[in-house]
Image (cartoon, coloured by chain):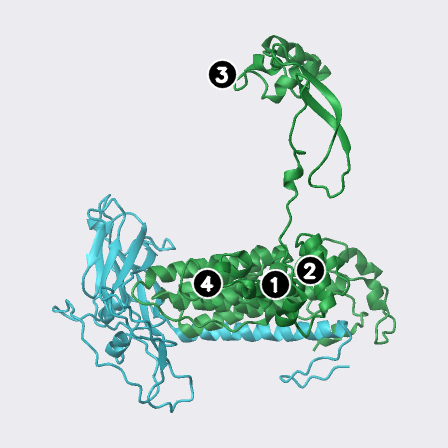
Amino acid sequence: MDAKDILGIPKTQLPTTQEKKSRPQKEPQRKPDGISREVYALTGGLAPLMPSIDVSQLKKRPPSDEKITWQWLPFTNSARKDNLQLYHWVRVVNGVPPTGDYSFAKYNKSVDVVKYTDEEYEKYLTDPMWTKEETDQLFELCERFDLRFIVIADRFPSSRTVEELKDRYYVSRAILIARAPSPTDVSGHPLVKDPYNVSQEVERKRALSMVLSQTKHQERKDAEVLAEAKRITDSRMASRAAEEPEMPVASHVGSESADRAVVLGDTVSPSSNIQLPSATVVPSTSIIADSASTLASLRMLRVYLRTYALEQMVQAASSSAGLRTIKRVEQALQELGVNLKPKVPTKAVCAEHLELRKEILTLLNLQKQLQYKEAEGSSYRDGSYIDMPGTPKRSQRAGDQDRTFVPESINFGGERVGKRDQKRKGPGRLSEAPSSPAHKRPRKKASDL
Amino acid sequence: MEGEIEPVDCASASKPPRIEIPKVPDDSEKPIAIKRLKDVEICVPIVYGTMAFHLGRKASESQSHRWTVYVRGATNEDIGVVIKRVVFQLHPSFNNPTRVVESPPFELQECGWGEFEIAISLFFHSDVCDKPLDLYHHLKLYPEAESGPKSTKKPVVMESYNEIVFPEPAEGFFARVLNHPAVVVPRLPAGFVLPTPVPIDSVHGKGRGDTKNHPLSHWFMNFSEADELLKIASARQQVQAHIIKLRRELNMMNGLPPPPNPASGHDYA
């Protein structure tokens, strides 16, 4: 504000910063009549064109012809088994208190847990895994807790899984069927209609927990794979109108992928009745997987250009690499005198080119590893395994390492970098610290070969 | 019924290509299922590009060059065995910019002054593939270097080598092109039974489809796979040598004994 004074800029009303000034401005615009401003603001502030709430209605409501009092009266609850009498405020109209049961009594629902007689137990329910006492306990808990199996499992004296308990409880289905005079009588009963499948349930819950515990990374990969699968099935649908080939389903690689396959299979299969291509069950983190799925999708095409295939494979191979790394690969290719895109892209040339790119990636990774190792600090190196007489402290190098990580360029042939000191290190390493022939590190020795 | 048919005589050591017989649909209106050869790849090496001659004294503002755009077999064999027709899509400023060439040699000649991108669509015979394949080429009229007076004799040539790949060719297609010089076809194991080839109707009446004696053939570029392979192989060697070195260094830093190095007899202590 003072700045504005100084500058002589006319003071504009900024609603966020100048509250004191804006309030008087709001006053004449205020519409509410009879209710406070804050309350009116709850309805949406200043009056809309079509008033959504009739303001006048907000204040006056009570019907005038009845006499209303509020009294503190006792009440009983039919839902209770004891005759506990409690008190509460009751709205009395013209001296007549309200009739009827306690309004919340109707919510006291419970489950009809099947009760078996001992006979029935002997006939239908004997089970090597369960004693009668346990079964009785179970059913009692079921009744008490309205089939809330999580609670029941918790309260159950011996440790049983929820699925085991459910499985045992749902055996009461057998009782129902047995009791019924004919099968059709009970077929409508939910217990009979949908039998409990223990193994399926166990599996389902395991798959669910796998999905729930997925990391973000896995989620993304799954989404990618799904998108890829969709793309593949779409392109296949489009190009294979006449034929429905059988796709080989790849072998499940580990239970994790199997679970994903279960999940994926369930979600994707309703949309197409063609079996999913192998791409969908591939583990998400390997480059081999990406290449395999790229190959699969290439085979899906009726025709393609060799250069296109190479592009796809290169992309798949560098899928885990960042843009910077890819640029460095290209730089390396140039230094090696290799065309970024082969001039004569035959099958053999493309294959070799791809392998070269992969090898360069490996090389870059190794370089990075090496640099990180070096940067790990002097203490690591001073206590080295090999006795090095007269090795100066690495502290003079520490300064270099504190710099932000600068990737070294691969140098093949040494044509381009003029100042490289040939003596000190082998090809492929730009020297960072001034060379000194007194350094007798074994690492150097190796590279001197 | 889906199934695999093994070839009659499995004498070869390599995995024999399986014939994939897809489900034959019950609906008789659907096209008949095509038998395809899995794990068999038919490859057609092609070269496509442009050649531009400056018109010299006959040049005008609007027409300074006479150029040809074409698609030919990489070895100058007749690609009409695979390609039925080629559609060249020119710059909209040309009359009828969509030019269709129904028979080989698949080329088009025009006059103009400007450089632009030409879209080339390859349409294949019905037993080959029902989808076209698109290529793109930038028409180059002016040479890189300003090398003295523009010659009307020497054209500016820009060609690209590529290979058309059919990953799962139909049996009939395979049988038809099995021995054609324009097509690269892998050998099938002995005893593999193929249907008798059905010749396609071609508009080949006039002249030949190959470009071996093409008037401009001496300007065609040479594409040598060997050179490139050599370059890449030597590059790979260099990279592999570096990798070995770095691995050794890393292992030394980790205190591990150096990995056995089969290539060298180096001894270092």
Q: Nearer the viewer, mark 4 or mark 2?
A: 2
Q: Amino acid at mark 4?
A: Gln
Identify the chain drawn in cyan. B
| Residue type for callout 1 | Ser
Q: Is residue A73 left or right of residue B223?
A: right
Residue for point 45% across, 65% down = A276
Q: Which residue is mark 4?
A: A312
Q: CA distance from mark 2 to mark 1?
A: 10 Å
Residue A426 shown left or right of residue A323 in the figure: right
In which quadrant will I find the C terminus of chain B? bottom right
Q: Nearer the viewer, mark 3 or mark 4?
A: 3
Label 1: chain letter: A
Between A296 and A200, the one nearer to me in the picture: A200
Q: CA distance from mark 1 to mark 3?
A: 64 Å
Query: Which of the two discs, 2 and 1, labels the residue nearer the N terminus?
Result: 2
Please name the residue that numbered disc 1 is placed on: A172
Asked if disc 2 and disc 1 are in contact, CB closer than 8 Å, the reply is yes
Sequence-wise first label, 3 or 4: 3
